[in-house]
Image: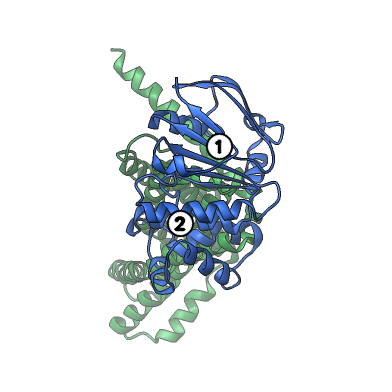
Amino acid sequence: MISFDHVSEGPMRDLSFDLAEGASAKVIYDSDDRRNVFFSVITGLRRPAKGRVQWDGQDIYALEENERLALFERIGVVPAYGGLISNLKAWENLMLPAWYHRGLAAPQAERQVVALFGQLGLTEAELQRQMGQLPDQLTMYEKRAVALVRAMLMEPDVLLYDSLFNGLDRESSNRILSVTGEYHGKKAGRISLYLCAEDAVSARLTTDRTITLAH
Amino acid sequence: MSIIPGRIGRVVLNVADYGQGFSELLLYCLRRVGALGRPPVRLVLQKQIYFTGIEALGAVTVIAMLSGIVITTQVTSLVGQNIALTAKIMLWTVVRELGPLLSAIVIIARSSSATASELANMKIRGEVNSLRLLGISPGDYLVVPRVAGITLSVVAVTFYFQMTAIVTGYAFASLTGNLPFVTSLSGILSTLSLTEVSVSLFKALVFGLVISVTSCYYGLRAEGSITAVPRAATGAVMRNLITVFLLNGIISYVFFL
């Protein structure tokens, strides 16, 4: 379902891999430059100098803008810094794609949201405080938690986690590992792709495949 | 010697670039007006109407009242207590010119710079791309409701400005000249023709579209560092002022001369 065919761009050289439906993989990077380039290329934001990037057999860079937007309705992206919209409060950010695409209003999603945040270690009181804040008032972990739950509410076919564990303590990392691992198996054919630094957490992460971004 | 032609050439290219970007964005908004049917987009529209229309009413009320009083005072000092002539001049200045123009200036000062800098900030922080990664079209979510909200607000604020200026002007004239307020006001309003009102609202509609599309255009073309944010805001305000004054002259010439 995701295919890189001899893709080269900037510091990323001749990368090839295929991920079939249901697969999980970790992409290990050794530099932030390579991580940035890989993330931009796989999400269609930066056309590679060489090679082809395919989603569902279609070259992502050959898609029209509306086709690409339709594709991303099925992909949950959790960017390293949360990718939250700065003028929307945390709960507005959380609900935005589900409300926009599926008409899912906050009261309908409340139970699922509380359960997911509970798994991430947040109490209802903390959640209430956090939801009323703007992204700039949240910690990195809180931003990532909002982005993670936002992606999960869309029930996507593919989840792309960018540097989910960077800078987190062991307890927070373990919680996220457990939530994402459990979520992967909840939908048949779901692909989970972790973009992570070469560290102790990524070593604990068990996936079907490991792809290395290096020279 | 070659500096002046070079500068002129740059100005022409900038104007051409702006013209092309403006038309593309305007056509996009007209084609995608259906996006307002989505609840999150409607929420952005409501917020925009609140910030641009409702929050501007305080400043607009003060400016409209003072304009009404100044015009009535000046006309009365020139022609004396001639209610018919005062009415005509009041209508010409407030309905035809000052209403649309001053309302547009207030909204340019408040909302054009705010919109351009907000969008520029979002662009530079990567939030426009974040929307794409959520499968949400930045044009549908950010531009369409802002253009619709600012345009509707300009039309409504212009009408409010005109009514406030006329009523205040005549209340002031009645107070200082011992004229019956209700009779003179109804006399003035009866001299208003449909053409006068329609052209005035047409002006407001055109100004609204220009202000909103230009502000979004300058905001979304920002690139690079954070210094692009104030540049986008200043660029949008200056371009809007020039365009609105130019269009005001053209529309007045076409309809009233």
- Quarter occupied by residue B174: bottom left
Q: Please tell me which residue lies in front, B220 or B85.
A: B220
- Image location (x, y in percent) of residue A149: 52, 58
- Name the residue furthest top: B1
Query: How far apart are labels 1 and 2 at the CA level?
Result: 26 Å
Classify residue B189 as left or right of residue B118. right
* Pointer 1 or 2: first along the chain: 1
Q: In the image, what residue occupies the spot 36% across and 76% down?
A: B168
- Quarter occupied by residue B8: top left
Q: Mark 1 points at which residue?
A: A43
- Number of numbered discs on residues: 2
Q: Name the residue under label 2.
A: A175
Q: Is mark 1 on a helix, strand or loop?
A: loop
**Chain A, which colour?**
blue
- Compared with A87, A80 (above or below) is above
- Which chain is drawn using green? B
Q: Please tell me which residue lies in front, B240 or A183.
A: A183
The chain that hosts pointer 2 is A
- Compared with A164, B208 (above or below) is below
Q: Marks 1 and 2: CB-CB under 8 Å?
A: no
Q: What residue type is labelled 1?
A: Thr
Q: What residue type is labelled 2?
A: Arg
Are discs 1 and 2 both within one chain?
A: yes
